[in-house]
Image (cartoon, rainbow, N blue to C red):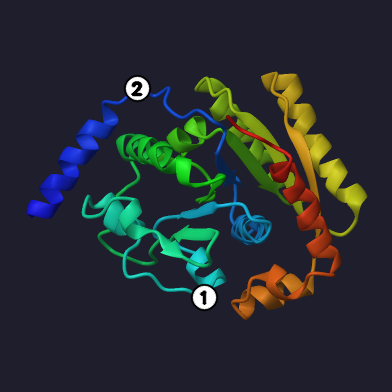
Amino acid sequence: MLGQAKRLLELKNLIQKEQTENKDGKIVSFTSGKGGTGKSFLSGNIAYLLSETGKKILLIDLDLNFSNLNTLFNIHSANTIYHYLTYNKSLSDIIEKYNNNLHLILGESGKTDHPAFSNQKAELMINELKNLSYKYDYILVDTRSGIDEGTLKFLINSNQVIFVVTPEPTSVMDSYVILKMLKINGADNSLKAIVNKCFTAEEGKVTFDNLDKAAKHFLKLDVEYLGELNFSEEVIKSIRNQIIFLEGQNSSEISKQIKKISLTFQKQTFG
């Protein structure tokens, strides 16, 4: 109880800090309107690739009670985001080291007493991440699919939001709904999109154009196209085997596509 009381006092001090601290563009959230778009695969492999180029990366599984990144990386952590949201640990306490440049904050799965991700907890997490940001070149966040109040709060306060979309019309529509909610709530972050599970490059571009045209026409928002990834049995196999795809598939077409997308991160500078 004493440890938890101390943690609550720390959090009280954090939430009182000015929201203008450390606005350096480092917090990048991956989101989608529906499950199964490949958010975890993309955020995990982009984080791994950036770490291999020398970037310091913190990757966070914000799907809370439906964690995927622990399975993707085949890693178990005794301390997860559950312990943070119950006020028992700080974010620094729950960071796992995957390699020298890639650190992870993992989620839980199936806890019956998992706390909700409220607006206040999202705000506290954002503030604490900003205090940690000096240690990293990027903080990549794999959010839950869909939207709730905490996830929306987190997306609004992220510097960049990357929509992972598939060619199905429902995926495009669901992403549009999240864009609309960001607009209604006054978000002014950088908006980008990746189209996953395409059969052709043209299919990816058409899918993005459908989302972009709706965003421009109805919401007056600009979305940047980062590229597409092909549908691939190799990707499915790597997920089943709990192997990071880019650790063993550096010459495949999917690897080239991920590397091309990651260049948009490597070209950016902050400060």
Q: Residue at x 56, y 43 (%)?
A: 29
Disc 2, SS: loop
Q: Residue at x 41, y 43 (%)?
A: 132
Residue picked out by circle 1: 74
Q: Up-down: is 220 above or below 49? A: above
Q: Up-down: is 97 above or below 204? A: below
**Observer-nearest residue: 130 or 213?**
130
**Observer-nearest residue: 21 or 142?**
21
Neighbourhood count class around disc 2 (C-alpha, 10 Å): few under 14, some 14–19, many 20 upward = few
Which one is closest to the eye, mark 2 or mark 1?
Answer: 2
Q: Residue at x 74, y 42 (%)?
A: 264
Residue 219 in the figure: left or right of residue 156: right
> Residue 53 location in percent, x, y?
68, 57
Amino acid carrying label 1: it is: Asn
Q: Is residue 148 visible?
A: no
Q: Are marks 2 and 1 in contact (CB under 8 Å)?
A: no
Residue 153 in the figure: left or right of residue 249: left
